[in-house]
Amino acid sequence: MSLMTPLLRLRKVVRSMGASTEQADEFADAMSDYPGRREWQLMLDEMFARWFNRTMLGMILLISLAVAIIVALD
């Protein structure tokens, strides 16, 4: 299945709803600018990786601070 197949099907649906050829082409072009399923998954994976890294860094800093306070009090 080529990349254009979903866009051509989308264009056909828009045409069947009564849009002109130019309007259907414009709509299909606008929809082609949105990310696909793979791009969304990559963005989500990147977002969760950043969240995990920040959380781990925060936990390490918090534990380090607690250990430093305990050592300082002894």
Image (cartoon, rainbow, N blue to C red):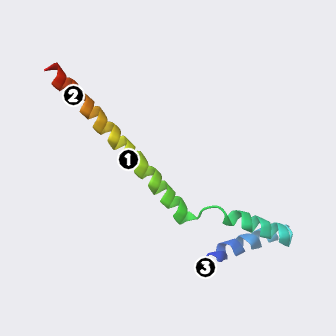
Label whose residue precedes the other's in the sequence (3 or 1): 3
- Residue tagged by mark 3? 2
Question: What is the x, y in percent for residue 60?
Answer: 28, 38
| Disc 2/disc 1 C-alpha distance (Å) | 24 Å
Residue type for callout 2: Ala
User: Which residue: 66% across, 76% down?
Assistant: 4
- Residue tagged by mark 1? 52
- Residue tagged by mark 2? 68
Q: Nearer the viewer, mark 3 or mark 2?
A: 2
| Disc 3/disc 2 C-alpha distance (Å) | 59 Å
Front residue of 30/60: it is 60
Residue 1: image quadrant is bottom right
Cβ atoms under marks 3 and 1 closer than 8 Å? no
Front residue of 40/54: it is 54
Q: Nearer the viewer, mark 3 or mark 1?
A: 1
Label whose residue precedes the other's in the sequence (2 or 1): 1
**Disc 2 element:** helix
Question: In what quadrant of the picture does the C terminus appear?
Answer: top left
Question: What is the x, y in percent for residue 6?
Answer: 65, 72
User: Which residue: 69% across, 72% down?
Assistant: 7
Residue 63: image quadrant is top left
Residue type for callout 1: Phe
Residue type for callout 3: Ser
Cβ atoms under marks 2 and 1 closer than 8 Å? no
Front residue of 16/44: it is 44
Q: Nearer the viewer, mark 2 or mark 1?
A: 2
**In the shown orientation, is residue 24 left or right of residue 50?**
right
- Sort mark 3 into few (<14), some (14-19) or many (20+) by Cα contacts within 10 Å: few
User: Which residue: 50% across, 60% down?
Assistant: 41
User: Which residue: 73% across, 68% down?
Assistant: 28
